Amino acid sequence: MKAYHGTTTIGLVCKDGVVFATDTRVTSGYFIAHRQGKKVYKIDDHVAVTIAGYVADAQNIIDAIRFYANMYRLEKKSPIPVRSAARVAANVFFSSRLYPYIAQVLIGGVDASGPGVYNVDFFGSMTQETFVATGSGSPVAYGVLEAEYSPELTIQQAIPLAIKAMLAAMKRNAGTGDSFDVAFIPQGGVYRELSEEEKRRYVKELGILA
C-alpha cells in the first residue's frame, strides 16, 4: 500500500490574525503522486488546520476536529476556542500512540483570547507557537522566518513573509514544490484563501521565481 505524504507547512501569528502557507506537492517515496494536493483546511470560520505527513492519517485528524468543533457550537452556542480545537487533535494523536497517526498538524485561528497557532505532533505533544514550520522543507523555511518574523507584523505584512519562506523551501527541498496555498483568518473576520491571481501578484512583488 502506498502512503502519500504532505510536506512543508507554515503558520504565523500576527497582531491582527493568523496566516498559513503550504506547498501542494504530495509524494510517495521519491514519486510525486500529486502536484496540487490541498494541505490547509477550514475547520470553522475562525479556525484552520494544516497537514504534513501521511495524508490519510492527517485527514482522519481533520474529521475529528471538525466533528468536535461542530458539537461544541451546537452545545455551547458559541465557536470552539482555538486551544480546545488543538487539544482535540492532541488527544486523538495521544490515544493512538501505540499505532500512531503519522502526521503533524498546525491548528490556528482567532477567538476571544486573540490569535493563536498550535503545533501538534503524532505523539500528541502540543505547543503554542508564534511562528512555526513543519515537514521536510521546514529547516529552510525556518531560516527565512527566524530572520524576518516579528510579532508586530500585520496579516498584510505576514503573507509575503510566509510566501517567501515557502518559496525558499520549494527551491531547496525535493519533497516540497509545484505550487503553494496561503490562507488567513483576521481578527473579527473569517477564513479566506488567496486566489491564484493574488498569489501571482505577491510572487511578482517579491521578485522571486516560483
Image (cartoon, rainbow, N blue to C red):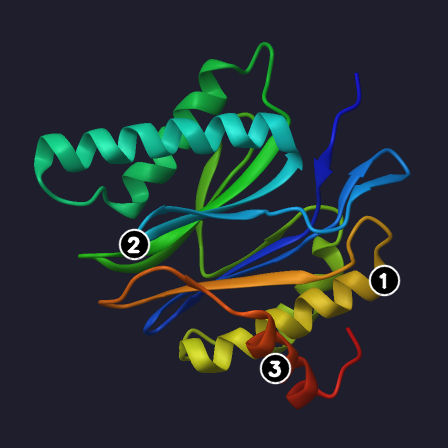
Query: Residue 202 in the image: x percent, y percent?
Result: 61, 82
Q: Position of residue 73 (x, y in %)?
A: 17, 37
Q: How many marks?
A: 3
Are discs 1 and 2 less than 8 Å apart at CB?
A: no
Task: Identify the disc placed on residue 172.
Answer: 1
Q: Would you call the spot at circle 3 few (<14 residues within 10 Å), some (14-19), or many (20 or more)? A: some
Residue 166, can we see it? Answer: yes
Give the number of the mark in front: 1 or 2: 2
- Residue drawn at point x = 67 percent, y = 69 percent: 165
Which residue sits furthest top?
Answer: 98
Q: Amino acid at mark 2?
A: His
Residue occupying image coordinates x 73% and y 56%:
139
Q: Amino acid at mark 1?
A: Arg
Q: Mark 2: give few (<14), some (14-19) or many (20+) Cα within 10 Å.
A: many
Tag 3 near tag 1, CB within 8 Å: no
Residue 202: which numbered mark, if any? 3
Which type of secondary structure does the marked residue at label 2 adopt?
A: loop
CA neighbours of label 1 inside 10 A, class few (<14), some (14 to 19), many (20+) = some
Residue occupied by mark 2 = 46
Quarter holding the C terminus?
bottom right
Quadrant location of the N terminus in the rendered image: top right
Answer with mark 3 or mark 1, whichever residue precedes in sequence.
1
Q: CA–CA distance between discs 1 and 2? A: 33 Å
Label 3 to label 1: alpha-carbon separation: 20 Å
Indicate which disc residue 40 carries. none
Q: Nearer the viewer, mark 3 or mark 1?
A: 3
Do labels 3 and 2 touch, CB within 8 Å? no
Callout 1 secondary element? helix
Q: Is residue 124 visible?
A: no
Horizontal relation, residue 193 to residue 187: left or right? right
Q: Disc 3 or 2, which lies upstream in sequence? A: 2
Mark pair 3, 2: CA separation: 24 Å
